Image: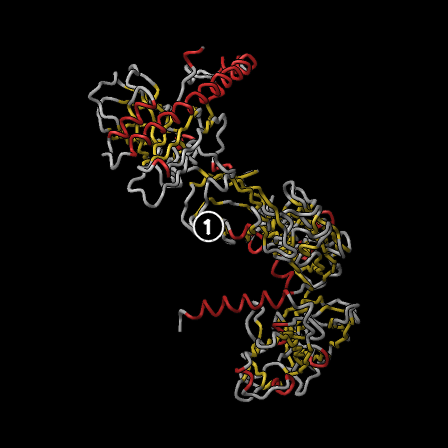
């Protein structure tokens, strides 16, 4: 149980702070009881459960308890009876000394409702104190020649009770010489005086013994007595007299203990012992008696306790001077305690807002402060100010209240919280001050849109990427906090090549990572423009956007495509012609190829993979030109087969091959004769057919030569107009520029001539085909979308079904014009 006690105390303090903070909003109900003092512990004060509208068992269930006020608890709750009972002895005189009405206040808290009930208990006085004299025995000396009706002051009786229970009357024991008279002071006090009714005679009686009785008005009546012994002295006919009837002194409250304040002085005209005077307090209250001391011989009044202006700022006492004969004189002493600046100002937070929205207008209330200084006059005048250059100010409210308000519109993104120090300083010397610290948090509002880290984004994507691949990540920052800083990413709607953008890419709404939804093809789509939007989750939401450029990088995914020689569509075989008289380096033909890729992936190189006669032909590495590597010999076969490979420079490299057939002969008739000799004669008609064919080929050759001469004339005319262009063409220096076409950096020599002859064993069924020249100065690639013209013209010959053999010879002769220039 011992470890739980601090936890319970902390809990009580926290609840008390919360209750005091909302006390102005909670309407309290006042309950009043009246009880006499001096009740025994556990005495019933009132039925608190009835006044709270609860059953006794509900007091514990609903957390009903007395809120402590930092002093000894005088009351307690009885959970069984539901009553408010005393927790100890209640002494009215101890609690409310000198007060006409003694009223005790306590607070009852119902925790589940967080409601406070104020309870006011009036403690009624009972006659539990009898009057008493501070001096139970008193000796009065009276000269024997004292005149009748002379009055002698008697000690004052005290009774802490009030009303009728307080001191009401004095009574003197019966005697023959003295009587009693009671004087009423301005404050209602009663002062007894002894009156000499009959002259004294010391020789008859030297001492008189009297009893002074003080009675109150209680039921039963309580009394207190003091014994008085009257000593009859020899004649002393002069009483002491004070130099002034009233003594005044003003002293600061921080006076050291033992300091002399003033000296009262009384003189007696008598001589000798009859002139000796002794001083004493005739009337002094309990507080003054604990603070001041009067020297009986010198009349010096000094302090024996600490002075406190806030506790008592004025003291009034009465002193008397008495000689040996019993004559006395009275004088008043008035001491004023001056205030010094010994109390620092007190600052109490009456109301406090722990946070304030950043868009709150100027003058928004943050806290309400109550400032008080127990000192008086200038020492109690307080100045409040805020330390540092903060956007707040203090405004005087009501009385000692100050309002802490905002001086500007706050911005959480610049300063999220403030530590406000309010200083209260009084005007005393030296000034005293008190500081109070207030931590204020600035609550966020959605006043900032998301901001991207870059003004624009770009990313490079290799083509043929897998679907779902991460492309790029965009990031936006929102200086707000919590949900106002939570960013959602999205893509602006758009179309790309007639398809919605959402079919190409998507973005993660949380991370801003862009993903590919399809595989990109560089040959179809080279770049993609995307607008990314970032929106926060505030109310209302704010957004911003940024441009994102996606560039597709080319990959080596297309093999070279051979444009020349093109494969015939009718099943015939193309043949290139090389004369036997050709010198080394003679241009036989040229392989033309293109690659749909770009850059290095489209750089092509040509290689001779296979040849029926190794070392006879060579292929240009970059031009694709097929040239003779040595002079042709008679032993070289008529038909030469070459396999040329075209390879790009991609990684990995891709290639394509083409098979070339080269006929070796000095002239076309020679070719025909050699081809005819390859077949065995079937009948006598074969020789006639051969003759006709030779005549036909010769005729075609003549026509071809005439056409070439005309063409050369036209070419020479065009050459004069394009000589500047030829000067810039340094790639191929042996042929006119008009005879070449550029396909991704490749110059293709395209001037061709084609002979087609259909031969059968039956001359009557032969179908001669006229020669068809074919010139092409331009080449249209399939990649551009147009139809490419064939670089090889094939002649179709139809032979009779009765023919046993079909000989189709397609002769191509490529003429180089470089020697003409």
- SS at mark 1 in the image: loop
| Residue in the image at 44% along x and 24% along y | 751
Which image quadrant for residue 618? Answer: top left
| Nearer the observer, 355 or 687 | 687
Residue 89 visible at all: no
Task: Locate residue 806 relative to residue 534 in the image: left or right.
Answer: left
Q: Quadrant of residue 759?
A: top left
Rendering coords of residue 156 (x, y %): 69, 70
User: Which image quarter is the N terminus in?
Assistant: bottom left
For the residue pair 210 and 782, the one nearer the viewer reads as 782
Report which quarter residue 55 is drawn in: bottom right
* Residue nearest the observer in this picture, 417 or 27: 417
Q: How is the image coloured?
A: secondary structure
For the image, the number of numbered tags is: 1
The picture places residue 78, in percent across and down from the top left corner, at: 54, 84
Quadrant location of the C terminus?
top left
Viewer-closest of 697 and 246: 697
- Lateral position of residue 82 relative to residue 204, left or right: left
Q: Residue furthest left?
A: 635
Location of residue 262 with respect to 320 vertically, above or below:
above
In this picture, is 19 found above or below 732? Answer: below
Left or right position of 810 against 60: left
Q: Is residue 263 above or below residue 744?
A: below
Residue projecting furthest to the top: 821
Give neighbour class at mark 1: few <14, some 14-19, many 20+ (Cα, 10 Å). Answer: some
Q: Is residue 371 above or below residue 452?
A: below
x and y percent of residue 170 in the render? 71, 78
Asked whether the viewer can see residue 658, the reply is: yes
User: Is 302 left, or right, of 42 in this rendering?
Assistant: right
Spot occupied by residue 601 in the image (x, y as percentages of width and height): 39, 33
Residue that carries the numbered disc 1 in the rendered image: 518
């Amino acid at each position: 149980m011992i470890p739980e006690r601090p936890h319970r105390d902390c809990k009580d303090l926290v609840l008390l702070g919360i209750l005091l903070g909302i006390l102005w909003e909670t309407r309290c109900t006042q309950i009043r009881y009246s009880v006499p003092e001096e009740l025994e512990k556990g005495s019933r004060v009132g039925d608190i459960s009835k006044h709270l509208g609860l059953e006794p068992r509900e007091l514990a269930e609903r957390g009903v308890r007395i809120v402590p006020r930092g002093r000894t608890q005088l009351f307690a709750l009885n959970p069984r009876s539901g009553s408010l009972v005393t927790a100890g002895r209640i002494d009215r005189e101890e609690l409310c000394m000198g007060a006409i009405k003694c009223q005790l206040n306590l607070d009852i808290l119902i925790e589940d409702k967080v409601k406070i009930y104020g309870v006011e208990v009036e403690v009624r006085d009972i006659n539990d104190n009898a009057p008493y004299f501070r001096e139970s025995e008193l000796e009065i000396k009276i000269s024997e020649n004292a005149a009748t009706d002379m009055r002698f002051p008697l000690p004052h009786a005290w009774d802490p009770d009030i009303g009728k229970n307080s001191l009401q009357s004095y009574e003197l024991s019966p005697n023959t010489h003295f009587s009693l008279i009671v004087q009423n002071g301005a404050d209602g006090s009663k002062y007894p005086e002894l009156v000499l009714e009959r002259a004294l005679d010391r020789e008859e009686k030297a001492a008189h013994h009297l009893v002074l009785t003080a009675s109150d008005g209680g039921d039963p009546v309580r009394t207190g007595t003091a014994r008085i012994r009257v000593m009859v002295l020899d004649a002393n006919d002069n009483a002491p007299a004070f130099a002034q009837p009233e003594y005044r002194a003003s002293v600061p409250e921080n006076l050291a203990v033992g300091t002399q304040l003033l000296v009262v002085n009384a003189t007696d005209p008598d001589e000798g012992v009859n002139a000796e005077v002794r001083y004493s307090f005739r009337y002094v209250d309990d507080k003054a008696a604990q603070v001041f001391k009067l020297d009986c011989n010198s009349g010096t009044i000094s302090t024996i306790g600490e002075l406190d202006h806030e506790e008592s700022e004025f003291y009034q006492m009465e002193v008397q001077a008495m000689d040996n004969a019993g004559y006395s004189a009275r004088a008043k002493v008035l001491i004023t305690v001056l205030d010094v600046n010994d109390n620092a100002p007190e600052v109490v937070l009456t109301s406090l807002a722990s946070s304030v929205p950043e868009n709150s207008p100027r003058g928004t209330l943050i806290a309400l402060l109550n400032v008080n200084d127990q000192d008086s006059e200038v020492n109690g005048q307080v100045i409040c100010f805020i330390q540092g250059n903060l956007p707040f100010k203090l405004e005087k409210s009501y009385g000692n209240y100050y309002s802490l308000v905002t001086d500007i519109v706050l911005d959480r993104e610049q300063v999220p919280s403030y530590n406000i120090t309010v200083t209260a300083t009084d005007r005393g010397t030296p000034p005293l001050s008190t500081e109070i610290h207030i931590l204020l948090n600035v609550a966020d509002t959605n006043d900032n849109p998301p901001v991207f880290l870059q003004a624009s984004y770009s990313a490079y994507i290799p083509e043929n990427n897998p679907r779902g691949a991460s492309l790029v990540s965009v990031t936006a920052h929102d200086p707000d906090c919590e949900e106002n800083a939570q960013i959602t990413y999205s893509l602006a709607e758009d179309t790309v090549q007639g398809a919605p953008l959402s079919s190409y890419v998507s973005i993660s709404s949380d991370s801003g990572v862009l993903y590919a939804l399809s595989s990109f093809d560089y040959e179809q789509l080279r770049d993609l423009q995307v607008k990314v939007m970032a929106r926060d989750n505030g109310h209302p939401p704010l957004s911003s956007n940024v441009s994102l450029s996606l560039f597709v990088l080319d990959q080596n995914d297309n093999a070279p495509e051979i444009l020349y020689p093109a494969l015939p569509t009718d099943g015939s075989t193309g043949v290139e012609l090389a004369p036997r008289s050709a010198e080394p380096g003679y241009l036989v033909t040229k392989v033309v190829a293109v690659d749909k890729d770009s850059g290095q992936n489209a750089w092509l190189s040509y290689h001779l993979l296979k040849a029926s006669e190794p070392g006879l032909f060579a292929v240009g590495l970059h031009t694709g030109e097929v040239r003779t590597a040595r002079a042709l010999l008679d032993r070289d076969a008529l038909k030469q087969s070459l396999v040329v490979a075209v390879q790009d420079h991609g990684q990995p490299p891709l290639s394509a091959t083409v098979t070339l057939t080269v006929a070796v002969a000095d002239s076309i008739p020679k070719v025909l004769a050699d081809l005819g000799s390859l077949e065995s004669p079937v009948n006598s008609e074969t020789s006639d057919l051969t003759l006709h064919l030779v005549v036909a080929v010769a005729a075609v050759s003549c026509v071809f030569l005439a056409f070439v001469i005309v063409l050369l004339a036209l070419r020479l005319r065009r050459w004069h107009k394009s000589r500047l262009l030829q000067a810039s063409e340094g790639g191929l220096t042996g042929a006119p520029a008009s005879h070449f076409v550029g396909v991704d950096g490749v110059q293709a020599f395209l001037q061709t001539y084609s002979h087609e002859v259909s031969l059968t064993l039956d001359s009557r069924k032969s179908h001669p085909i006229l020669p068809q020249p074919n010139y092409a100065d331009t080449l249209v690639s399939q990649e551009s979308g147009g139809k490419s013209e064939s670089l090889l013209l094939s002649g179709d010959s139809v032979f009779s079904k009765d023919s046993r053999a079909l000989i189709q010879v397609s002769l191509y002769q490529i003429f180089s014009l470089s020697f003409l220039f």
